[in-house]
Image (tube, rainbow, N blue to C red):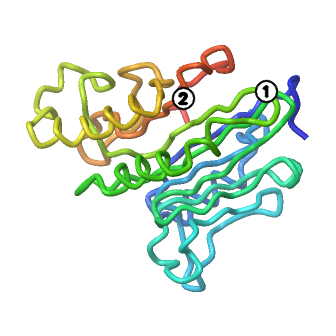
Amino acid sequence: MLDTTDKLTIWQQNVNKSPLSQHNLISSSHLANMGVGLIALQEPAINPFGFTIAMRDWTPIYPTPHSTMPDRSRVITLIRSNISTDTWMQLDFPSSNVVVIQIVGNWGKITIFNIYNDCDNNNTIKLLSNYYSRNRNRLEQAEVGTAYVIWLGDFNCHHPLWDDTNNDQLFTPKVMDAAEVLIEAIADIGLELALPSRTPMHQHNVTKSWSWLDQVFLSDHAEHMLISCDTRTDL
């Protein structure tokens, strides 16, 4: 069980539906050496039978609608099998773009949202806001300790709050309006940016320029719980 002496290390990555990328990530020693306990994948590799690539050390958690629409799943969360099933559970969410799990311990509980936000609309962000409003007590109250929330994933949003402000070409009125929907949502819920601004995370295959599409947002009362939040561009 997770207790007050444990730390939870999360690895987040968009694998661009590549079976090779996903297999190399999960089968490598990097994650084990870093003590990763949870993997949040966006655009995972799904085979024709509706399953993702996973090793025996990992338990895959699919979006709630996956059984009926496996080809639409844009996120997969994997939790290390040595984390007791008594300490975590999946919460239903009505979208193939989100997986929600809740982990509990004697320190409280943390609800982790693995998110893929489509670059063409903000439907997922609106669903998240509505879900939080309907389930606020379940997310904000803990029988023991304190409740925390993490939103992490590929948000496909650009904004001077986290992008390199020298990239003026990114900040079109349409892009800024889309980002404001996300900013208003996290402000209403009480989340703050955990990943330092202007931390590079994605290198374009052709131009080799860096962009800031992925983000991590954490409850504003959880700063003391955070050890670090960074990217590993060397990997």
Secondary structure under tag 1 reads loop
Horizontally, is 6 left or right of 213 in the view? right
Residue to which mark 1 is pinned: 145
* Amino acid type, callout 1: Gly
Residue to which mark 2 is pinned: 218
Horizontally, is 107 left or right of 141 in the view? right
Residue 144 is situated, as x and y percent measured from the top left of the image, at 82, 31
Q: Residues within 10 Å of mark 2 (few under 14, many from 20)?
A: many
Q: Is residue 23 above or below residue 32?
A: below
Residue pictured at 80% horizontal, 36% vertical: 143
Location of the N terminus (image quadrant): top right
Residue pictured at 82% horizontal, 63% vertical: 56
Horizontally, is 173 left or right of 127 in the view? left
CA–CA distance in space, label 2 to label 1: 17 Å
The one of 54 and 177 positioned closer to us in this rendering: 177
Residue 85 position by quadrant: bottom right
Mark 2 / mark 1, whichever is N-terminal: 1
Q: Residue furthest top?
A: 224
Secondary structure under tag 2 reads strand
Residue pictured at 50% horizontal, 24% vertical: 194
Q: Is residue 142 above or below residue 63?
A: above
The one of 224 and 57 positioned closer to us in this rendering: 224
Residue pictured at 49% horizontal, 31% vertical: 217
Residue 193 position by quadrant: top left
Horizontally, is 171 left or right of 108 in the view? left
Q: Residues within 10 Å of mark 1 (few under 14, many from 20)?
A: few
Residue 204 is situated, as x and y percent measured from the top left of the image, at 30, 43
Q: Are marks 2 and 1 in contact (CB under 8 Å)?
A: no
Task: Count all numbered tags in the image, as a single digit.
Answer: 2
Q: Is residue 55 above or below residue 214?
A: below
Residue 18: give its label. none
Residue 232 is situated, as x and y percent measured from the top left of the image, at 54, 31
